[in-house]
Image (cartoon, grey):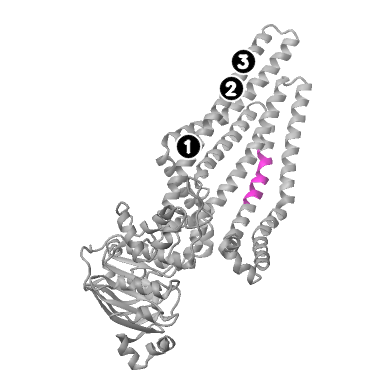
Amino acid sequence: MPHKKSKKSKKQVDKLTIREYAKALFGIAKLSFSVAPGAVIFKMFGIIIVAVLPIAVTYFAAQTITQLTEAYAGEPGAGRLAFTYVIITAALGLVTLVWESIDNYIQQVMRYNVESKVSDMMYEQFLSLDFWQYDDKNTADTYERAQKFTQFYSYIFDRISSIISKLVTVVFSLIALLVFQPVIAGFVLLAVLPGVFIQFKLSRSQIGHWNKNVDSRRARGYIEWNLLQPGAIAELRLNGLVRYLMDLRQKLRDKDERVQLEFERKYIFKRLLADGLQAVTELGALIWIVTQIVAREQPIGQFVYVQQLVSRALSGANGFVGDLSTIDEDLANLYHYQAFMNLKTRRRNGRELQTVPDVIDFKDVSFHYAKSKTMVLQDINLRILRGQHVAIVGENGAGKSTFIKLLGGLYEPSSGQVLIDDVPLRDIMLSDWHSKISVLQQDFQHYVFTDVQDNVYFGDVSEPMNSKLIGTSMDYAEATEFVNKLPQKLKTYPDNWMEDESGNHGVALSGGQWQRLALARNFYRDAPIIILDEPTSAIDAIAEARIFDRLLAKSNSKTVITVSHRLTTVEKADLIVVMENGHIVETGKHADLVAKHGEYYRIFERQLRK
């Protein structure tokens, strides 16, 4: 079955092994190199430059002070050496500044390239999933966690570079100290270890908390989205929900973010101790070198040398820990990214469907949704012939919309088969099948980000826009009259929060106007099989009658499958299918079903009496 999930334990999900970490880092480096090889090479070379140049500057600055002191004491040649060291120090400082400017630009280029690539991959994967996965909570959770990782993917290589650079800085600083002051080097090394351990413990606790609160964060996101939707404000105010939802949002926020602050509070004393140890180490190093200088065992320039190197070693270690804990958090979420990118995607192969099907056949079809054993459809047997108008009726929850989803190939039957000219739909290339059908669902899309004309054109973007067909489609959908009254007509944005490049504001459409626009989009598609799920619920009866008169004209050879609660729509059908609790309980023409006084008659009894 396509609904089966991985049985990995939660522990496995939340934590990667060392091998998985290494593999992840290699994968990040490999992807970064594939999209920006020059930038990666530059960055790797820059790691050494950025780490070594400041140490070199420190060394020559210390030598400058030593030579100045000796020159002041009258040492021959010391003044000339001091000038030489000053020039070298200034030159190295200039090289550092130039390098940082170039490195900043290179980082931006790499970040853009990597972010674009990863974003495209994420979208491609999400839009290629099997349809049932969009209804699956585990998939939704994995997607949300994967998003957290991908948001920082473009920065991760920068962080890796920064981690390596800071590590090199620490190592080189300790080596430089080891050459002249081995005791100080040992104490500095010991001082950084507690901070490393504490930061890692804190980051792991934060990661565990984040993963446990995906649901509450999602609920908070939904609330925040609804609170800022102009279309939702009326209902929220009329029902007195504004304050209630604001309080619930605050409760969910506190559950998530205040707990994170609690983690920080629990570790603050330990961090203060670690910081205190580093401060004492730095002070001790300075006292040690001052004592040696006073005893004339070290030149005066060694003070600057030790002070700078100890400071760089400690700050480099702290930066290393900070970056490492941050990337550790991101990589801990890498499992979810990899799990999401490895989800099964929809099939892209199959038999070609080059001609319009003559027969659509449901044979013993039953279906239940993922993680549910309740059958939504049971033992459905139905044959639809080319050119037929079939109406599907039944009360809410009867299984009508699920039937449409199976017909569209969005889901596969749990048992039985959907046959297209005796070929199982699962064996047909879905893109071919979708090119033969036009589906208008109850919850059709409102493309508010573009104009009315595009809202119709989106019915079929496989060819350049056909202005004549757009006009005809709007006529068929009874949309022409209201569109011609819009300020910019076809070029009007269908939302008053949008405006075009000339500054013309859009217009908010009514439910009926949106439905006519969606019908026009459906007609523009001009597919041989038309599937309509409650297509005219917001359109008046007279306009609806005209729409279906055109749609069902005798010269029209299209197959039309309609789900509707309106008798005026249903009674014109060649075949009426009555569904109840996932079963087909009656089939036939309007007059025959009325005469039977069965389920069909019960559903439409009130409308029949008018």
Tell me the SS state at disc 3.
Answer: helix
User: Could you classify mark 1 by the number of other residues whose Cα lies within 10 Å: few (under 14), some (14-19), or many (20 or more)?
Assistant: some
Is residue 522 rendered magenta in the image?
no
Residue at which label 2 appears: 94
Whether residue 483 is visible: yes
User: Nearest the camera: 491 or 305?
Assistant: 491
Which percent across, then down, holds residue 445?
A: 44, 62
Amino acid type at circle 1 is Val
Amino acid type at circle 3 is Ile
Please identify, in this view, whether the residue under mark 1 or under mark 2 is nearer the observer.
1
Instruction: Give the CA separation, mark 3 to mark 2.
Output: 11 Å
The mark found on residue 109 in the picture is 1
Which percent across, then down, holds residue 351?
A: 23, 64
Earlier residue among tags 1 and 2: 2
Residue at which label 3 appears: 87
User: Nearest the camera: 213 or 393?
Assistant: 393
User: Residue drawn 49% across and 56% down?
Assistant: 146
Tell me the SS state at disc 2.
Answer: helix
